Amino acid sequence: MKCYCTGFLGTRVLEIVVSVRGLMKIEILAFAIVIIISTIVAGDFSSEKAASNAVILFRKTELKLQLIALLEKDLKLMNVNVVTDSLNNADDYELKNYDAVIILSNITQSNPDTKAADYIKKNNYSNKIVYLSTYENINYPYGVLDSVLDRNRIDAITAASPPKGKPVNKIEIQKARKAVMDKVKIILEGKGSSREKQI
């Protein structure tokens, strides 16, 4: 039986001749050696990239629950371990333990959610934070006249949320999904912060 193996560069061919009746152990060992040599020659002797970690902190609405299901699927495809929890428990999640923190919050009385704003400020407007704020009528992700959050220090993604009892707009969810994932990809690639996206 002949086994032809080539390295990535295709410059060398190693031929191992083992009789069919012959020594199975030698055949396996020879094949393993060929694979190792090919990998070293190709310069591809590194282990798989370690998984990243992300947490999604959210206020419970139908739009956000549907969005979370999509984000979890997208993040897992990117080899990201995902934890989801209520924004009420934000203090339990130290930023240093995560590669990305995704906040899905609301606008209440023309201001961002207090827990969301507190977490963002406590973590010095870190570029590891993805901030999405939903609204029904008035879109003030930073507060009236930017009184709560500094728009120059945190990017805001905003999405229209349907009033209670109304169906969720699937197009709005897909736009929010894309905007959040675009930001997460930038964070995980280490390229820093993108600017405000309103959808």
Image (spheres, rainbow, N blue to C red):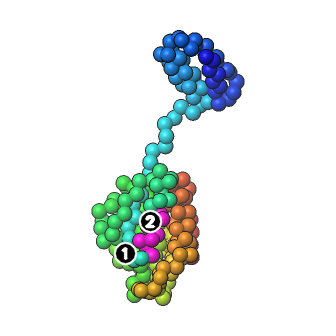
- The quarter holding residue 84 reads bottom left
Q: Position of residue 158 (x, y in %)?
A: 51, 76
Residue 166 in the image: x percent, y percent? 45, 85
Label 2 to label 1, Cα distance in Å? 13 Å
Dot 2 alpha-carbon crowd within 10 angstroms: few under 14, some 14 to 19, many 20 or more: few
Horizontally, is 17 left or right of 88 in the view? right
| Mark carried by residue 69 | 2
Percent across and percent down for residue 90 are 33, 67
Q: Quadrant of residue 53?
A: bottom left
Mark closest to the chain's N terminus, 2 or 1? 1
Place residue 12 in its image quadrant: top right
Q: Which quadrant would the N terminus be assigned to in this image?
A: top right
- For the magenta stretch, what is the residue range? 63-71
Q: Disc 1 marks which residue?
A: 60
Q: Which mark is residue 32?
A: none
Q: Which residue is at a point 55% across and 21% down the rendered structure image?
A: 31
